[in-house]
Structures are given as structure tokens and as C-alpha cells.
Amino acid sequence: MRAASRHQTLIVTSLLIGLCLGLCIASFYRDLSQRKAEVEQTFKSRYELIHQFVALQRDRVQVMNNLFVGRYRVGVEPGSDGLDLIPHPDLGIWELKRQGIAGSLTGAAPLPLSSQLEREIHAALAMDAQITPALELAQEVTWLYYQSRHQFVYIAPQISPRQFHFSPDMYTSGYWREGGPGENPRGRMILKGPYKDLAGKGWIVTFAQPVYVKNEFLGMVALDLSVYTLEQLTRVGVAAGETMLISEHQRLIARESGFEPELTLHPPLTESLKTWDKGEHGDLWLSRWVIEDELWLVHRLTRAQLWRAAARESMGVWFVVVLVTILAIVSLRLHRSLAEVTRLTRIDPLTQAFNRRGFFEAAETSMALAKRKGLSMAVLMLDIDHFKKINDNYGHAQGD
């Protein structure tokens, strides 16, 4: 009977443990799905924010381009102030001195300037209508400028020529080479970077728009952004894994954990957000382009990060399920122990027959049943004669 009870307890305990494991596993996989869904939602929010931010900067560049072209087509208006150009022989450049302009204009074109070049400088100054509010309202903008193919540059905010001025080396920069007619015949706005700012403002990226008037390439309107600003945008919200901005050459531009120069990644890239893609190392990726074929926002989630995040979320459920299971097992064992103690108080341990207490409890029940049904009862008593001598001579152990 006791063996059957132990077997029954073992079965119930095994079932409880199995139920506990099943609930924990189900909770874990549910949390895996929920964590992925939360990452998708955070990624979408970051994408919308970064997409709007980048679109705003591109609009600023486009407005500067429109102001430049519009003023260039009008030409130098009658009564316009002359160009007061101050030579800097030690630097090999000249500087425009004029009050009330947003930036600094330096160049190396031979003096005196041609009427066409003066017209181009006046067109560059017309960009102040966009540059001034941009500098006042957008702290994330590092530089706004126009670089002419006729050896001058207009850059805002103002900077001393000894800190930064026009140099022929500027024509070797990446945005100039890739944005010019040779490599960019369609004249699209390009994104270049990240690279270190020549004026010492750290790592930046450039949005550059080539300027054409009547199919003639004049120069490049550009806006520089700090990489730090883009990093801040990739940290908006909370999500397991890491969000990054990747250029068309799969070069890292910005990421949550901080910029790392010259780092290239090779994630699976998509035009629009869809389901998770698996990378070459088994990592999970989300991606969506911010600028068509130029800039992607991607999110990498390793399986270890996903499992850790799910484990943290399901820890409470695991604790409760395990605690309830332990309490159930303890309760079951206590019940079994109580039943055993109760049995031992009614049974003689040697003969396994009822002792005095057990006999009277059983007899009371039997007498009540006999009385109710009108039955007779009989009691059989057995005794071994002179059994005391056996115990006295041979001991109680032999007697038992």
C-alpha cells in the first residue's frame, strides 16, 4: 500500500514538474515573439524620425540650390554693393569683407574678378535667406556652403580664413569628385562620408547638390551634419540589438554604440521594411532605405541578445510557476506524510494489525453499520500460551 502511495506521489510530482517546464517554455517563446515585435516597433519609430530628419536636411540643400540658381539667372542687380575683396598674400587667397552676411567667402581666382564670377558670388550670398534661419534653428547643422569650380568657397557660419579657407585640395574631396559631372551625370544629390571635418568639428557627413545653370556645372551646394547627431537619433527608444545607418558602399555612418571609422558591414538590405532577414552569421536584421540606393537604416539583433531579452521578460512567470509547483509538491508530500503518521497511530508496526485505537475506530464503524442493517457481529481473539517465557528466555527480538 505504501509502495503504491509512493508511486502515485512520484507520478503526480512528475506531472507537476512537466507542467512547470511546459509553462516556462511557452512563456519564453511567447516573450521571444513579443521582443521581436517590440524591436520592430522601435525600429519603425527610429526610421520615421531619421527619415524626416534627413529629408529636412536635403530640403535645406535644395532650397539653397534654388536660391542660388534664381539669383544667378537674375544677375547682379543695379545698385548692388560692390565686392570688397581683401588679399591675404601669406595664405595665397583673398577674402570678401562685408557686414551682415552669414558666412565667410574666400577664393584664389585671379583679381580683378570677371563679371561672371562676381555674378556667381552674388548668387552664393543669396543663399543667406536659407542659411541664416538654418543656423539659428538647427544646431545639428555643422556647415552650409557653396563650393565653386571657379576657385572660391562660401561657408557658414563665419570662420577666420586662418582656420579655414579655399584650397585647391578641396577639389579632391570625395563629394566633389562623386557629385561632379564625371561620376554624377544625372546631377542627383549625393551623400558622402563620414570623414573628419577640415575645420576641426569632428566626424561629419555631407549632403551635396551639384549646381547647374543652362546645363553648365558651376559648383556644389552642400550641408554638413555631425555624426554625433545621427548617433543620437539611432538611440531613440529602447530595443534589444543595435540600430545603424549604412551608406551605399555598406560603410558605417552612425550607430547606437558609437562611431567606428572605416567600419564596413554586409547586412541583407531591402527597399522597404518587411520580415526579419538572417545574416551570414545567423544574426537577425531589419532594414529599410532612408535615401534610395544611398542610405539605409538597419537593425542587428543577435540570437543571444534576443534570448537574453526574452529570458529577462519571462523571469517573473518562471518564478511564479516554479514557486507554485514547489508549493504543490511540498503540499503533496505533507499530505502523504500526514497520512502515514495517521496510519502509524492506528496500526501495530510488528503485525500490521489494528492497535487499540485502530480497533476501536474500526469497531465503532462496524457496530454502527451492523446496527443500521440489523446484522450480527463476532469477535475472534487469538492468544499464544506462555509466550512471555519465549520473550524472557530468548529476548523480545526473537519473540517478535
Image (cartoon, rainbow, N blue to C red):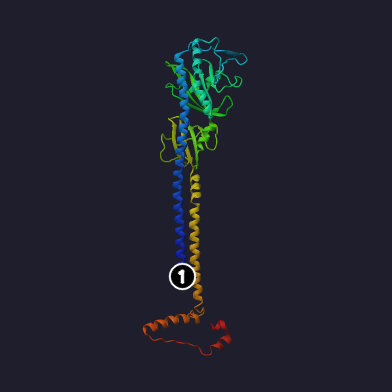
Q: Is residue 272 above or below residue 368?
A: above
Quadrant of the image containing the N terminus? bottom left
In percent of width and height, residue 219 lies at: 48, 18
In percent of width and height, residue 259 lies at: 54, 34
* Quadrant in the picture for residue 388: bottom right
Q: Is residue 231 above or below residue 183?
A: below
In percent of width and height, residue 248 lies at: 46, 30
Front-lying residue, 41 or 184? 41
* Quadrant in the picture for residue 260: top right
Q: Residue furthest front?
A: 79
Regarding residue 125, the answer to whether it shows in the image is yes
Regarding residue 182, the answer to whether it shows in the image is no
Front-lying residue, 56 or 210? 56
Q: Residue furthest bottom?
A: 385
Q: Which residue is mark 1?
A: 5
Front-lying residue, 392 or 175? 175
Q: Residue at x 51, y 90 (%)?
A: 385
Q: What residue type is disc 1 on? A: Ser
Q: Residues within 10 Å of mark 1 (few under 14, many from 20)?
A: few
In percent of width and height, residue 298 lies at: 47, 36
Q: Is residue 218 above or below residue 249?
A: above
